[in-house]
Image (spheres, rainbow, N blue to C red):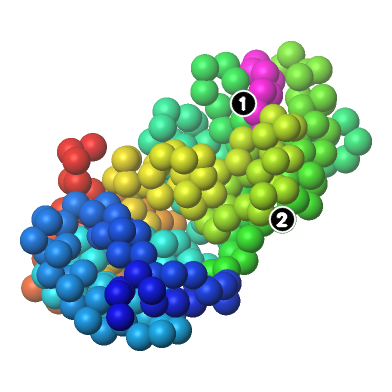
Amino acid sequence: MKNESFDIIKASGEKVKFSLDKLRASLNRTGAEKQIVDQILDKVRDELYQGISTKEIYNRAFSLLKKKKSYLASKYKLKKAIYELGPTGFPFERFVSAVLEYSGYTAEVGKTLQGRCVTHEIDVLAHKNNETTIIECKFHGEQGLKCNVKIPLYINSRYQDVKTHWNSNPKNGTLLTKGWVVTNTRFTKDALQYGNCSGLYLVSWDYPKNDGLKDKIDRLGLYPITVSTLLTNREKQFLLSRDVVLCRDLLDDKFYLDHLGISDTRKEKILNEISQLCAVENH
């Protein structure tokens, strides 16, 4: 049986044909050498069966990559690592704020702003070049959940309410010009259509094309601490609770690893993995 004729099951429950090219592309994105990618593809292809889940294919490729180079496996598990920022959306808001700061914005999390009609709690407020942007973060803790049209509809009405009040007050010193919605999953077709029509800027895992969340993270080398293949879940949660959201933060705050009682040998391995991740493409 030709590998392309296998049916695989996505997280949403949808059946699709297996695509070797998609798997190759996801492995290539980690920066793994062609030889490593080819070896992994051969092994995964040999173990395919009808109805295999994408999760199972992913886990197999991940464990093979981890054996080769752990920091490449960290890059490969990026999507899963974003889900691990949960269960509350707060670390995701912090994460989005950090991505914006590395893109030249100054950003604040969890601000309450007065609208023309009511007050609104804003996830991230960002400023750049005398312009202000409000960003709403929609975090889903599991795969297969999409943001439907109700979300941009609701966010746009909040944005318009805040915008009217903000721009009528010269003391703010900037103009509120943009509203964003950022999600770690995807938008439905209607949600994208409404966002584009209303002027909201929508960012999902892979939208806009070549500038989605995964592209921004890879380009800026801003990996969440949850990508580490060497830290335990307990250690990750401890670091998140101390506002260490990015791998880069840990390089600046190494002392947290001492708080966790991590041995020198293991500490060296963890910092080495994280340094390699942050050094990718010399950002």
The vertical placement of 211 against 55, above or below, is above
Q: Is residue 236 left or right of residue 43?
A: right
Residue 72, x across and y down, in percent? 20, 61
Q: How many marks?
A: 2
The answer to which quarter of the image holds residue 2 is bottom left
Residue on which the image places disc 2: 148
* CA–CA distance in space, label 2 to label 1: 26 Å
In terms of secondary structure, where does tag 2 sit?
Answer: loop
Say which label, 2 or 1, has the lower sequence index: 1
Name the foreground residue: 276 vs 232: 276
- Examine the residues drawn in magenta and state their main secondary structure: strand
The answer to which quarter of the image holds residue 175 is top right
Residue 84, x across and y down, in percent? 45, 69
Q: Is residue 178 left or right of residue 105?
A: right
What amino acid is at disc 2? Answer: Asn
The answer to which quarter of the image holds residue 78 is bottom left
Is residue 55 among what the camera can see? no
In the rendered image, residue 215 lying in the magenta stretch gets the answer no
Local packing at callout 2 (Cα closer than 10 Å; few below 14, some 14-19, many 20+) is some
Q: Nearer the viewer, mark 2 or mark 1?
A: 2
Q: Which residues are magenta?
A: 172-179
Q: Is residue 77 left or right of residue 30?
A: right
Q: Residue at x 49, y 77 (%)?
A: 9
In terms of secondary structure, where does tag 1 sit?
Answer: strand
The vertical placement of 135 against 173, above or below, is below
Name the foreground residue: 183 vs 29: 29
Which part of the image, by quadrant, shows the N terminus? bottom left
What amino acid is at disc 1? Answer: Thr
Q: Which mark is residue 54?
A: none
Q: Residue at x 19, y 46 (%)?
A: 280
Q: Which mark is residue 132?
A: 1
Q: Residue furthest right?
A: 117
